Amino acid sequence: QVQLVESGGGLVQAGGSLRLSCAASGRTFSNYVLGWFRQAPGKEREFVAAISWSGGLIYYADSVKGRFTISRDNAKNTVYLQMNSLKPEDTAVYYCAAAPRDRGSWYRIQSYDYWGQGTQVTVSS
């Protein structure tokens, strides 16, 4: 089992920044790919970003590329999502998730075995 706890969400004006954190406990953190997803009201949960166990491979959704940065600190069992130039359409509940490091298709919800409870991000115009 891996337990994931997100933090860092809040209310910010358009153009502002937030940094989300996801602290993990349980099994060996470095055995997992870490991903961020988000779900806006009335919409399906969607992929935002993912990072390999070593940090050497990173993927972003086109909608956040160039604005968001995912990173991880395996010594601290924590993954981060730095969000800059936020837009109202970034408003959503953000979830971190963990997938076994040898599993592919990191953009797919079904690839992830463990999920956090989510943290609300609201961007006002």
Image (spheres, helix red, strand yellow):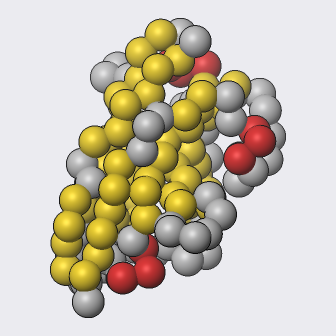
Left/right of residue 95 with respect to residue 14 in the rendered view: right
Query: Residue lying farthest front?
Result: 42
| 24 or 43, nearer to the observer | 43
Residue 118 in sight: yes
Front-most of 29 and 14?
14
In this rendering, the answer to whether 34 lies above or below 86 is: above
In the rendered image, the residue lying farthest to the bottom is 125
Residue 102 percent coordinates (x, y):
77, 28
Quadrant housing residue 111: top right
Residue found at x 27% / y 54%: 9
List x then y, in percent, for residue 96: 49, 42
User: At 35% across and 49% down in the image, what residue appears?
Assistant: 119
Where, quadrant-wise, is the C terminus in this rendering?
Answer: bottom left
Residue 81, position in %: x, y? Answer: 38, 52
| Res. 66 image quadrant | bottom left
Q: What residue is rendered at 53% in x and 10% in y?
A: 27
> Residue 56 versus residue 59: which sits nearer the camera?
59
Q: Quadrant of the N terminus?
A: top right
Q: Is residue 34 visible?
A: no
Say how many tags the image has: 0
Coordinates of residue 60 in the picture (x, y in percent): 58, 63
- Relative placement, left or right, of 43 versus 80 is right
Q: Quadrant of residue 45?
A: bottom right
Q: Is residue 7 above or below residue 39?
A: above
Residue at image coords 52%, 58%: 38
Horizontal relation, residue 13 to residue 68: left or right: left
Q: Is residue 69 left or right of residue 38?
A: left
